[in-house]
Amino acid sequence: MSATTTVRLTMAQAVIQFLQNQYTARDGVEQRFFAGCFGIFGHGNVAGIGQALHQYPDFRYYQTRNEQAMVHTAAAYAKHKNRLQTLVCTTSIGPGATNMITGAAAATVNRLPVLLLPGDIFARRNVAPVLQQLESEHSQDLSVNDCFRPVSRYWDRINRPDQLITALPEALRVLTSPAETGAVTLCLPQDVQAEAYDYPQALFEKRVWQIPRNRADSQALARAAEWIRQAKRPLIVAGGGVKYSEATETLKAFVEQTGIPVGETMAGKGSLRYDHPLCLGAVGVTGTSAANLPALEADLVIGIGTRYSDFTTASKTQFQDPAVRFININVAEFDAYKHSAIPLVGDARVTLEELGAVLAGHQVEDSYRNRAQQLHDEWEAEVDRIYAIRNTPLPSQGELIGAVNDQGDPAAVMVAAAGSLPGDLHKLWRARHPRQYHLEYGYSTMGYEIAGGLGVKMADPQREVYVLVGDGSYLMMNADIITSIQEGYKLTVVLMDNRGFKSIGSLSRSVGDQGFGTRYVYPNNGGLPSDEAGDDVRDLPVDLAMNARSLGAHVIECESRDDLAAALDTAKQIDHTVVIYVPNDRYLGVPGYHSWWDVPVAEVSESDSVRAAREEWGEMRAKERYFL
């Protein structure tokens, strides 16, 4: 077809026509990149993108209830699809647009591709200021959409219809890049969306974006192999990159070949099955004794697809060997160079395959491998102990996690996010397959859970999806229960009610502040009472089970761990979203295991508890280190 052949479309129509013809391919498997579009319409997009979606029904439109939530759904979808597919999100200008900023930040922090199409102010300025326009005396080219700049991996404002011709391919380049992906924001002025232009037909032809498996430098690979041969106590830290590159089987083969044990980050949990004898489970602040003890003594850390968050490194206190060294396998050069590592910049799967070939015949000493297996077995006994707790009058969070893990479908996916659940789940969840453990913890976003569960279910409709959510997150964002019912995507939501912010209550007590402001109670003596207040504390009359019923869910109310186990069986027989409501003890938590997190404590205080916490903080702060 001649490059001069044109088709006259509005800018918005051109956007949709382009998006529906974009594909990704890796290892010879080709798939459409965009699975549809979530959107809430207002004056800033209803006559543009809204009209285009109506005109082109093959590009599936999904109705939603909350702009932030739809971005979480799209990110969860992309995560479950190993970043090879995603969804589009469109809003009007104004609060609809800025509501997406938290979702954009979460997607970018977690390196997940999501395309955002917020409406924008008029490019022709004669009618300004328009409704919801933020005026600036310093620039007429400023809108609330500029807030997306720091949380987007690519940002552009399309002030002329022809700018799409260069902007759209750049947006796709970033979205499909394993190293650079994240939220991409294209701001679409509402007048320009409706303008027509003669676009080259070639812009709308099918385009396949090849997802490469880049290989590490051969000399760096040889140096890394030499370091591994020299190491006495090497430890692998498996991050999300193991799963995104579909390297779980390669990791298993590498571990069995070399005998090097594995600790897992939040994103990397499930890289090895929980019952593999060299899977030591979670590492870092929310880690297990099995992983954290070897981490303290490791003389070599091999990071695979991890960005080394403070939870993974325990605020730079987890790796205490004075001569510890790092090898990092990562598609992103930025992450590969962290901690003065030998950077193996490349795809995790092919890099592990090539590293394994160079290390043929090498194994760690039997004593080290046996010690790792012993720690694994001891940790499994500790999980059994916590699962077996029967706390009264309210069940503990640990035993409730055990009920879902034991009684739920072993092929299911478990979704959670902020609060105390991620820490307990990271330690206690027994991941049976690589996709079973789905946590948003890069941004620790309250409200992600139900929206994220919907994204997972859309990506993999045949699997059961269990959403574990606390009352705090549930109250922040629960409306997509309606979307799940409307679209026929069944979720099983386990709603754990501890009457407040359990995680921050515990953190507050640990820094001497007695849980101030973290319970859902009536004010006392003119202000919020502490978490430890006495008999005069009055809980708020909130009925979350009734709330879930009002949104259309089938609700099962429980009082104990055994009730929850029975409810999970009942839920399997119900064909639409189920909310299982269960109260739990806000004070009984899962212990920490040989790790610490840096939360600064007030340097001066009239409180004895704060002064004691400050002294303890100072002792641990001294253990933080640089890796040079």
Image (cartoon, helix red, strand yellow):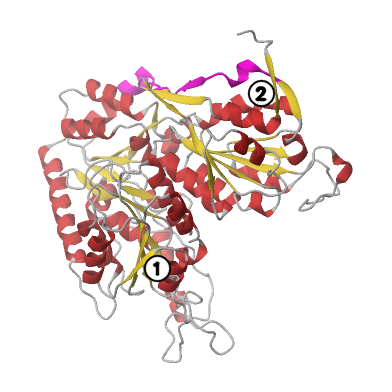
Would you place residue 243 above or below residue 132 in this image? above
Specify the quadrant of the image occupied by residue 273: top left
Residue 390 lies, in percent from the top left, at 20, 73
In depth, the one of 382 and 316 nearer the eye is 382
Q: In the image, which is nearer the foreground, mark 2 or mark 1?
A: 2
Would you place residue 168 above or below residue 373 in this image? above
Alpha carbon of mark 2 to alpha carbon of mark 1: how far?
Answer: 56 Å
Find out whether residue 220 is within the magenta segment. Answer: yes
What range of the chain is rendered magenta? 199-223
Q: Residue at x 39, y 50 (%)?
A: 489
Badge count: 2
Residue 14 lies, in percent from the top left, at 65, 28
Q: Is residue 445 visible?
A: no
Q: Residue at x 61, y 53 (%)?
A: 99
In depth, the one of 339 and 497 nearer the eye is 497
Q: Residue at x 22, y 29 (%)?
A: 229
In depth, the one of 88 and 594 nearer the eye is 88
In depth, the one of 553 and 79 nearer the eye is 553
- Residue topped by disc 1: 616
In the image as oriented, which residue stretches furthest toward the top? Answer: 2
As drawn, is 197 to the left or to the right of 234? right
Crowding around mark 1 (Cα neighbors within 10 Å: few <14, some 14 to 19, many 20+) is: few
Specify the quadrant of the image occupied by residue 38: top right
As drawn, is 619 to the left or to the right of 54? left
Q: Amino acid at mark 2?
A: Thr
Residue 257 lies, in percent from the top left, at 17, 30
- Report the quarter where the C terminus lies: top left
Find out whether residue 445 is within the magenta segment. Answer: no
Q: Amino acid at mark 1?
A: Glu
Crowding around mark 2 (Cα neighbors within 10 Å: few <14, some 14 to 19, many 20+) is: few
Q: Is residue 68 visible?
A: yes
- Residue topped by disc 2: 166
